[in-house]
Amino acid sequence: MSDGVGHGLFEHARSAAARGDWVQAFALLSEADAKGLLTRDGLPLLGEVAYAAGHLDVTISAWERTHTALLQADDPVGAAGAAVRVAMHLLFDTALMAPVRAWLTRAEDLLEGHSRTPAHAWLGAVRAYERMLSGDGPGGRLWARQAVDIGSMSAPAACALGQVAEARLVILDGDVQQGLALLDRAGVAAVSGELDPISTGVVYCELVCALQGLGQYDVAEQWTEAMERWCETNAIGSVRGRCRVHRAEILRLRGSCLEAETQALLACEELRPYLRRELGWPLTELGRIRLHTGDIAGAQEALVVAHRAGWDAQPDLALVHLALGDVATAAAGIRGALDRPLRVPSKERPPNSDLQRAPLLEAQVEIELAAGDVVRARSAVAELDRISARCETKALAAGAALARGRLLLAEGDPAGAEEFSFRASRLWNQVGAPYETARARLCLAAAHEAGGDEHRAALERDAARTILDELRAGPVSVPLVQLEHDEARPGQPIESDNLFRCEGDYWSVTYDGQTVRVRDLKGMRYVARLLAEPGREYHVLDLVAAERGHGGPAAVGGTPGLPYWALGDAGQVIDAQAKEAYRRRLAEIDDDIEQARAGGDDERTAQSETEREFLVTELARAFGLGGRERRAASASERARAGVTRAVRHAIARIGEHDASLGEHLSRAIHTGTYCSYLPDPRAPAGWRF
């Protein structure tokens, strides 16, 4: 620090970080930085604290500045290490591969003439992931081995990341058993407590991703539970949100779809400050959950948003079109996904792998048979059989068996269809996946019916319906997915006894048989709007605009009133520093495109051009018509604080009259930039207004 003031701010920030108060630590470091008091030695702490506090752009900028400062201090190895950290954050949280390659190349150049330093280990770990996400498995394995060999002596975290990268690459190469053995070794590092929080979280996340991709759900569930326990006290940055996505995946598989949707919505909120295109990952999981419960409109909404973010939302988007009866669009979507994959770089779903194609192929069989194209369906079944035989997991075998059963039924072989659909239902039941089991039993019912056994067909169909009815149970009635040829029987809405109604200057509130009256407060109107639509995320500006627009107690279900821009502004959507970072990213991408074209690498060229288009779109969002800079609503932060305060005050007032309801609302209402009402399914359901 340049003086005592700067040193004091830095020490207070370090103390705040040590106790996990990331917001306070970030505020202190930002103050020191704004005053020019933060020296080269303090920049790495700023990068770490900014990441924990949800400021990814500041994190990357801090490491870029560290890189520059170390270059000026004639420390090439230190500068290389900082360059690798820039690349790591760009890779894990933005998946922009061209800038990642540029920073890794800088690190390689700086490390030339040096050997076996921790920076070499970190370079190997991050380069292994860059190669994996670019589809270069052999190259990735070489870099992963460098991370393990060097990191085992000098950088345990880099070694652990190298181990898990190597394991995933071995699995993607088809040697599942060796890959699983390597994953076990990598898992030891996660539970040892010897790694920093970010590295520990990445290792946990990678383990679960690899196991779920293989369909090893039992083991994936065990690691997810271990990750959750660790997250309770140690998670920083995007790790907690990633953990929620994994939990949502497991809950959806096990049939707890309401709880799964809650976790997916919270994951979207927690990952929003970090992820760019990969925000499509939790959104796609949200769409899949809603598809399982029959909320077709909600599934389509989530999947379309994921697609707009640049994510590949297939096969789920095609299955939504199938559920809506638009077979032609479903067929076109699934064929395009298989023939012209987007290849979005993602450590959750690495490209160019059989494991990524398997769910697409399963969906294609169902869709092509609905479209009457048995030839395409037969080809997809054959490829699924090959993948299942190579990977040897129950889930993949179950998916392949059901696909074969569907095909045989379409080809007029009810006995064969019965054999394979029964095998699929048995395997899915062993996996513990009720939705998939029900789908297999519906196919089995159709096979029995085609073979003339009406009694067994009715038994299987009723069993499947019972499972599906249980999956859609919850406070909000949604239609059943059309998984069978006959029409679903619509359920009758249940009139709730719970009441939340404004009557003049007071609200009448009835919950679980007890009625209280609470004076009208702004927070009561916010609460009413959230209760009206359980599960929906409201931006705080929507809540404020709706409340102001009605000039009094908000009519629940009304449309929002004032637009965001009517609430004031506080500067540019992207500040000058962030815009400069975007320009640097674009320049790095342009350089990568030029190099790829010169080398005749068409796939790398296409990938970089897609990244350029994505960044240009992001920048365009920061500008209005004629190139004028758009203004960010200063009201957003004010509204977040105001809405949170008002809602909590209203809940406290309700709790004074009805402690049980106050406790329920405290647990179920989530506030922040996005607010929602996510009730426990065991609570008294529904509200009248």
Image (cartoon, rainbow, N blue to C red):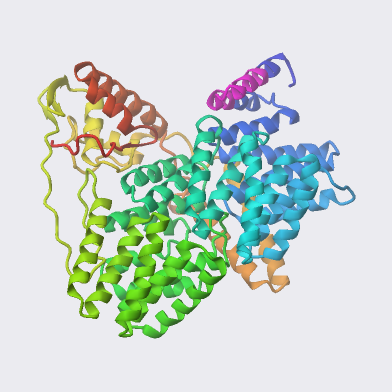
Q: Position of residue 425 (x, y in %)?
A: 35, 64
Q: Nearer the viewer, residue 35 or 427?
A: 427
Is residue 589 shown to the viewer in this render?
no
Q: Position of residue 440 (x, y in %)?
A: 33, 66
Q: Residue at x 66, y 53 (%)?
A: 182
Q: How many marks?
A: 0
Work out which quarter of the rendered image holds the C terminus and state it: top left
Image quarter of residue 400: bottom left
Q: Nearer the viewer, residue 404 or 629?
A: 404
Q: Is residue 430 above or below residue 409?
A: above
Work out which quarter of the rendered image holds the N terminus and state it: top right
Image quarter of residue 50: top right
Q: Is residue 614 left or right of residue 566?
A: right
* Residues drawn in magenta: 9-28
Q: Position of residue 283 (x, y in %)?
A: 41, 52
Q: Residue at x 45, y 43 (%)?
A: 244
Q: Is residue 88 above or below residue 358?
A: above
Q: Position of residue 519 (x, y in %)?
A: 16, 19
Indicate whether residue 26 is drawn in magenta. Answer: yes
Type of secondary structure dominating the magenta stretch: helix
What residue occupies the far right of the structure in this picture? 113
Q: Is residue 398 above or below residue 104?
A: below
Indicate whether residue 570 is drawn in magenta. Answer: no
Q: Is residue 669 above or below residue 475?
A: above
Q: Residue at x 59, y 68 (%)?
A: 606
Q: Is residue 390 left or right of residue 507?
A: right
Is residue 78 shown to the viewer in this render?
yes
Q: Residue at x 22, y 70 (%)?
A: 456
